[in-house]
C-alpha cells in the first residue's frame, strides 16, 4: 500500500508564509541606538521579499553564502529569512572571533556577500583584502558612517542596505527543496579552527517546530520571545524561526546586552520567554529586582552549567528556575530541556533542584545513548553509568562543511559523538559529568571538573569557577581552581578549601586556588580553558 499524503516540502518559505498571512499584525520590537522600533510581520515580510529579490539580482549562484557581521536587529532577521528564501545560505558571523579565525571562517564558507553594521565597519574593512571570496559589502547604516567605495579592495562592490531594498521589487522567490542548504554556523574553535555545520531547510523547519511543543519551549502566539543569544549561536538557537512559526511577538535586543538595558527591555516589552547563556543571566537577573516580571514564564540557559545561586534568584523573581537546555552547534541548538515531568512533586525542593541542575530530557526528534569508550557498548540508563553522550536526529549533523564522509565525529552506525561524558537516569534526565577532554585523571581516578566547579560556585562568595588539570609527577594530573569572587566579597584560598572539604570526594580537593578579576571567555561566552591551561598548566607539579 502507498501512502496518500502530500509531499509538501518543509522549508523556511513555509514558515515565512505562515507569518505573513495569519499573523501579519503581530509585532517585532528592535532595539536600535537610542530607540526601540516596532514593526509588524506584514511590513517585515514585505521588506524581506524585497531583500530576497535584491539578492537574486546580484547574480549569485544557487547555494551562495550570504554572511552577516551584525547585532540582533529586525534587519538581521530580514536577512536570516531572505537568504534561504532566495536559494542562498545564511551565514551569521561571530563578531567576537579574533581576526585570524574570522578570516578563516569567511574563506572556509566562501561568503560572497557580507552585510555589516556600520558600527562594526572598523573591524571588518581592514580584513577585506584577506577575504578571498567576498564580492560585495552591504552596510546596515545605523551611524551614518560608510566607507568610500574606492577604499575597498578591487573587485568588492559597496551597497547601502536601505537603498538596496528600495530599488528591489517585493516579488517572492521561494526555494521549495527541503534538503537545500539554508544556513551555516561555525563552532567556537576552542580546539582548532572553527568547523562549519550546514543546516538544511528541512532541519530548520523541524527544529523550529520542536520549540513549539508543549514539553519543550512551548512557544505560542501568546508569547513575546526575546532571544539574547546572537544569531551566530546556531541561528540564535532558532528562536526567530520558532517565533515566526508560532506568530509570537519577537524582541531583538540590538548591540547593548548590558544588564540594565536588557532588564528594561524585558519589562517594557512584557517578555514571556528569553534565552541566554549563564554569563549573561548573571548580569541581567540582579537588574530585574524591583521590576515588573509578572509576564515572564520561562528563562532558558545553555552553553554551560547554571550556578545554583542564579537558579535561586530566578525562582525568587519569577517563581520558576532558569530552565537548563543542552545542545551544540552540531545539534541545531536544542536537543534536551530540563523540564519538570508531571509526576515530580512541584513542592519537593530536592527533586526540583535535581531537575534544574540536569541537562534535561531529550526533545522529541532527538535520540540519545551513552557508550563505553571505542567499544560503543551501550550503557544502561541508571543515573550512575557514565560514558560518552551520543545523539542522532533530523537536526543533528552528519559531518562538518568540507569534511569527507564518513566523519570521525560520527560513529559507523550514525550517532554523533558529542565529546561529553554523561549519565542518563531511568526517566531520561541527562547529567553531564564533563567534557571528555576536561576530565582530570589523578592517580588512576577520574575527577569531573564540572562537578567540582559546581561545588565551588555553591559558595555564596564565589561568582564563577573553572577547574583544570595540571601535570603532576606523582599523580599524572591534579586539579587546580581558578575563581572570581562576588563583588564586595573576600575569601582566602585556605578558607575556601576548608569550606569545600566536607562537600566533595577527598581526592577532588584542588591543589591550588587562584583568584582572578574575571575568567577568560571564548567567543561564544564559555570559559576559555585553553587560555587557562596556557597560563597555569605549563609547569609540572610534584
Image: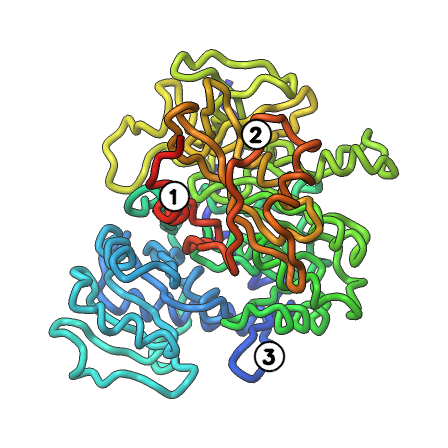
- 214 up-or-down from 272: above or below: above
Describe residue 540's horizontal placement relative to residue 259 as left or right.
left
Q: Within 10 angstroms of label 2, few (less than 14), some, or many (20 or more) residues?
A: many
Describe residue 135's horizontal placement relative to residue 513 as left or right.
left
Q: CA distance from mark 1 to mark 3?
A: 43 Å
Q: Residue 8's spot in the image, x, y percent?
A: 48, 42
Dot 1: what SS? helix
- 150 up-or-down from 226: above or below: below
The first of marks 1 and 3 along the sequence is 3
Q: Residue 420's spot in the image, x, y percent?
A: 48, 31
* Front residue (pair 3, 57): 57
Checking the image for residue 188, the label placed there is none
Q: Residue 160's spot in the image, x, y percent?
A: 33, 80
**Residue located at (46% from left, 71% from top):** 75
The first of marks 3 and 2 along the sequence is 3
- 6 up-or-down from 110: above or below: above
The reply to whether residue 181 is visible in this rendering is no
* Front residue (pair 427, 66): 427
Residue at the far left in the pictured view: 154
**Residue located at (65% from left, 25% from top):** 428
- Residue marked by disc 3: 36
The reply to whether residue 317 is visible in this rendering is yes
* Front residue (pair 309, 389): 309
- 84 up-or-down from 206: above or below: below
Q: CA distance from mark 2 to mark 1?
A: 18 Å
Count all numbered tags in the image, as a single digit: 3
The first of marks 2 and 1 along the sequence is 2
- Residue marked by disc 2: 508
Q: Residue 219's spot in the image, x, y percent?
A: 66, 51
Q: Within 10 angstroms of label 3, few (less than 14), some, or many (20 or more) residues?
A: some
Checking the image for residue 533, the label placed there is 1
Amino acid at each position: 500500500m502507498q501512502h496518500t499524503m502530500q509531499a509538501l516540502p518543509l522549508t523556511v518559505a513555509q514558515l515565512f508564509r505562515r507569518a505573513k498571512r495569519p499573523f501579519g499584525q503581530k509585532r517585532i520590537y528592535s532595539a536600535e541606538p537610542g530607540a526601540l522600533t516596532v514593526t509588524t510581520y506584514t511590513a517585515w515580510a514585505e521588506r524581506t521579499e524585497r531583500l530576497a529579490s535584491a539578492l537574486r539580482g546580484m547574480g549569485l549562484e544557487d547555494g551562495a553564502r550570504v554572511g552577516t557581521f551584525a547585532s540582533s536587529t529586525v534587519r538581521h532577521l530580514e536577512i536570516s529569512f531572505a537568504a534561504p528564501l532566495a536559494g542562498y545560505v545564511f551565514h551569521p558571523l561571530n563578531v567576537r572571533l579574533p581576526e585570524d579565525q574570522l578570516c578563516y571562517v569567511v574563506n572556509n564558507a566562501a561568503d560572497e556577500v557580507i552585510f555589516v553594521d556600520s558600527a562594526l565597519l572598523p573591524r571588518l574593512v581592514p580584513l577585506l583584502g584577506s577575504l578571498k571570496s567576498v564580492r560585495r559589502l552591504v552596510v546596515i547604516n545605523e551611524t551614518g558612517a560608510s566607507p568610500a567605495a574606492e577604499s575597498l579592495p578591487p573587485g568588492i562592490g559597496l551597497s547601502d542596505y536601505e537603498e538596496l531594498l528600495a530599488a528591489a521589487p517585493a516579488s517572492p522567490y521561494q526555494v521549495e527543496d527541503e534538503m537545500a542548504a539554508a544556513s551555516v554556523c561555525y563552532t567556537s574553535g576552542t580546539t582548532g579552527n572553527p568547523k562549519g555545520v550546514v543546516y538544511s531547510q528541512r532541519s530548520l523547519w523541524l527544529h523550529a517546530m520542536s520549540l513549539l511543543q508543549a514539553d519543550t519551549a512551548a512557544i505560542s502566539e501568546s508569547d513575546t520571545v526575546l532571544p539574547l543569544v546572537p544569531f551566530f549561536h546556531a541561528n540564535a538557537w532558532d528562536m526567530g524561526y520558532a517565533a515566526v512559526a508560532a506568530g509570537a511577538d519577537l524582541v531583538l535586543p540590538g548591540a547593548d546586552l548590558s544588564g540594565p538595558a536588557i532588564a528594561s527591555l524585558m519589562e517594557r516589552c512584557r517578555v514571556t520567554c528569553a534565552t541566554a547563556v549563564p554569563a549573561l543571566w548573571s548580569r541581567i537577573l540582579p537588574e530585574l529586582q524591583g521590576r515588573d516580571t509578572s509576564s515572564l514564564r520561562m528563562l532558558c540557559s545553555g552553553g554551560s552549567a547554571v550556578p545554583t545561586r542564579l537558579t535561586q534568584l530566578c525562582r525568587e523573581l519569577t517563581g520558576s528556575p532558569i530552565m537548563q537546555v543542552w545542545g551544540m552547534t552540531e545539534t541545531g541548538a536544542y536537543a534536551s530541556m530540563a523540564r519538570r515531568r508531571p509526576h515530580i512533586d512541584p513542592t519537593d525542593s530536592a527533586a526540583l533542584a535535581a531537575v534544574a541542575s540536569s541537562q534535561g530530557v531529550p526533545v522529541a526528534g532527538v535520540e540519545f545513548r551513552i557508550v563505553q569508550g571505542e567499544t560503543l557498548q551501550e550503557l544502561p540508563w541508571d543515573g550512575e553509568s557514565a560514558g560518552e553522550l551520543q545523539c542522532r536526529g533530523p537536526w543533528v549533523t552528519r559531518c562538518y562543511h568540507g569534511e569527507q564522509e564518513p566523519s570521525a565525529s560520527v560513529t559507523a552506525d550514525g550517532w554523533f559523538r558529542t565529546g561529553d561524558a554523561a549519565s542518563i537516569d531511568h526517566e531520561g534526565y541527562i547529567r553531564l559529568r564533563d567534557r571528555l577532554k576536561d576530565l582530570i585523571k589523578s592517580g588512576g581516578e577520574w575527577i569531573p571538573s564540572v562537578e567540582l566547579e559546581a561545588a565551588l560556585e555553591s559558595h555564596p562568595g564565589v561568582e564563577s569557577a573553572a577547574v583544570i588539570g595540571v601535570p603532576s609527577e606523582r599523580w599524572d594530573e591534579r586539579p587546580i581552581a581558578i575563581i572570581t569572587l562576588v563583588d564586595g566579597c573576600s575569601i582566602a584560598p585556605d578558607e575556601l578549601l576548608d569550606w569545600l572539604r566536607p562537600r566533595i570526594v577527598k581526592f577532588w580537593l584542588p591543589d591550588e586556588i587562584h583568584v582572578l578579576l574575571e575568567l577568560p571567555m571564548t567567543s561564544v561566552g564559555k570559559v576559555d580553558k585553553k587560555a587557562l591551561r596556557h597560563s597555569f598548566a605549563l609547569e609540572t607539579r610534584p
